Each structure stands twice: as C-alpha cells, then as structure tokens.
Image (cartoon, rainbow, N blue to C red):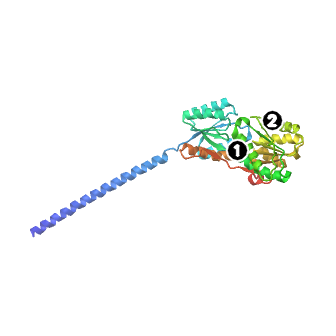
Amino acid sequence: MKKIGILLIVLALVFTIAGCKAATAADTTTAAATTAATTTAAATTAAETEPAKVWKIGFNNYADSHEFCYKVHDGIEKAAAEYGVKLEYAEATMDGAKMIANTQTFIDKGCDLIIDFNWIPEVGAQMLKMCNDAGVKLISMDTVYEGTYYFGANSYTAGQVLGEYMAKVIRDKWDGKVDTFVGVYYLAGGDIVKDRVTGVIDYLKEAEGIDWPADNLVFIFDAGSSEQTVKCKQTATDFLTAHPDFKHIVFSAHNDESGAGLFAGIEASAREADCLVGSCGGDTPFRDHLKGGGGDVWIASSAFAPEKYGSQVIPMAIDILEGKDVPMEVYLDHFVITKDNVKEYYPEG
C-alpha cells in the first residue's frame, strides 16, 4: 500500500510539472504573438501617417495671352490640383534667354520635373543639359528636344488627317483639280511644326482622284513667331495678287491663328471661289469662324484639343518621377473639325 501511495504522489507531481510547463509555453507564445501584432500595427500606423511624396513640377509656358497656351495652362493647373502636384509657373514667350532663366529658377525652387511649351529645339538642348546636371526630368510639348520626353501633337499625323478631309472637298468642289499649294508654318519651330503642312502635301499627292500639279508647284512661307494672323493675311494677299490666274489654290496653316490670317487675305482679295484653307488646332479662332457661318472656304482644322493636355501630361510626369516605364514620345489623338461635326465635339460651338 505504501508503494502504491508513493506512486500516486509521484504521478501527481509529474502531471503538475507538465501542466506548469505547458502553461508557461502558452504564455510565451501568446506574448510573442502580441508583441508581433503590436509591432505590425505600429508599422502600419507609421506607414499610414507618413505623408505621401508631393511632386513639384515647373511649367514653362509660352504665354497666357495666346489662347491655345492659356487653355493648356488651365488644364495643367486643374490636373495638378487633382493629382496633388505642386505647380510652379513661368512664361518665356519663345525668348531663349527667358527659357534658360526660367529653367534655372525652377531648378533652384526644387522642381522635380519641368514641362516646356516654347518650341525652340536649340534652346531645348541647353535646358536638357541643365536639367540632367541637376537631376531634374524634362518634358517638351509640341516640339521635340532631342534626348528628352515628348508630349503633344503628332504633327505629321495631324497633317495627314487634315489632308484626307481636304482631298474629299477638293474632289467634290473642284473635281480633284489643284493648281498650286501654299503652306505657312512657324519656321523656327523646325520640322516637327513643318510636318503639319508636309502631312497635308504628302496625302494630297497620293490621294485618289486628286490632280496634283505636274510641276509640283508648292510654296512655303514663314508664319513668324508673333502676330501670325496679320502676317498670314499679308502672305495670302500678296500671293493672290501675284497669281491672278490660279483657280484651285489649296492653303494649309500650322495653326488656327495663321489659318484665320489666310482666310482674311482671301476674303480681302475676293478670291473665295478659288481657294480652300485647312489649319491645325481646332481651337477658338476656327470654331468662331464656324459660328459666324463660315466653313466653305476655311473648311477644316485638325484638332489638338488644348484643354485636354493637362489631364494627360500630368499623369505622364508623375509616372516618370515614380520610375515607371514611360514611352519617350506620347501623342495626342487627332480628328478633323468641320461645320458638319463641330457640335459633336464642342456642343457649345
């Protein structure tokens, strides 16, 4: 009996000790889990409270006094606010010295990226070097600066789209006959601006049913960097005075301001029956012309939709800054505006 009693006592002690160890292990596991959970929660809270990166972007505009540029600026301001970007603003009016000075100011202010809208490739190359030296990204709009990102018009495509529509009207109105072609563009803007006119020429040359002049009679004039409407009116007036016998004259302009000038010169010369005009931009000058009952001589404009630049270029800039894979060239979609479809794209006219 004593042996049995002793055995029972020993077994009781064993179970008690085992229970104590199990409890201790459970307590240790619970404590470890609690500590891990606390650490995770703390890390999550820290991540949630850490402020997101606010990118600073400098926009070097041509000038708000130019309506197209104003609309681009307005769209960029709205997109910057929507995406939480801090925007610095300056104007250079295609003055090379101002472009460089503004670039340095943006760099000094700590901008992470600069968007330039001034269209001088030679100065753009200097800007790119400044930005590279400072570790700042650069996007050029509507003019290529070799080696940097590009956003904006596909100038040649815009010209081709315009040429396609003009070919249809030439066939319908003149039975496909073309006596000569007159193009105007901002010469200092280089080939990327000239391509808006070249695209029209190339399309018409190859278009079915177009009787292109055998001697390839093409005239190209500089629209200048300012007062383009006034200069292009004089260009059209002088050309029509010098060529009274031409009856099928196709005019093409790199923007609507120049298109307005060409039409004004045609009207002043009373040569509406002999001329057709196409332009690029699809902006207010052309739409106002349509509102006033026009559209039979100045017949079309290849739209660039300046009000939509900001909603595309700001996300592009953010993707660049965040290290995402962004194409070096991002283009707009182009479409032709005429008196028959303007309400479809711009209900207000």
Q: Which residue is found at the position 60% from the left and 31% from the top?
A: 104
Choose top left, top right, bottom left or bottom right for residue 137: top right
- At numbered mark 1, what does the secondary structure look like: helix, strand or loop? helix
Q: Front-most of 264 and 17?
A: 264
| Residue 124 % position (x, y) | 64, 35
Q: Mark 2 points at which residue?
A: 231
Q: Residues within 10 Å of mark 1 (few under 14, many from 20)?
A: many
Nearest to N terminus: mark 1 or mark 2 = 1
Which residue sits furthest left?
Answer: 2
In this rendering, does residue 174 appear at all? yes
Which residue sits furthest front?
Answer: 214
Kind of residue at badge 1 = Ser
Q: Residues within 10 Å of mark 2 (few under 14, many from 20)?
A: some
Q: Front-most of 250 and 225?
A: 250
Kind of residue at badge 2 = Lys
Choose top left, top right, bottom left or bottom right for residue 79: top right
- At numbered mark 2, what does the secondary structure look like: helix, strand or loop? helix
Q: Mark 1 points at which residue?
A: 155
How far is mark 1 from mark 2, CA to CA?
A: 22 Å
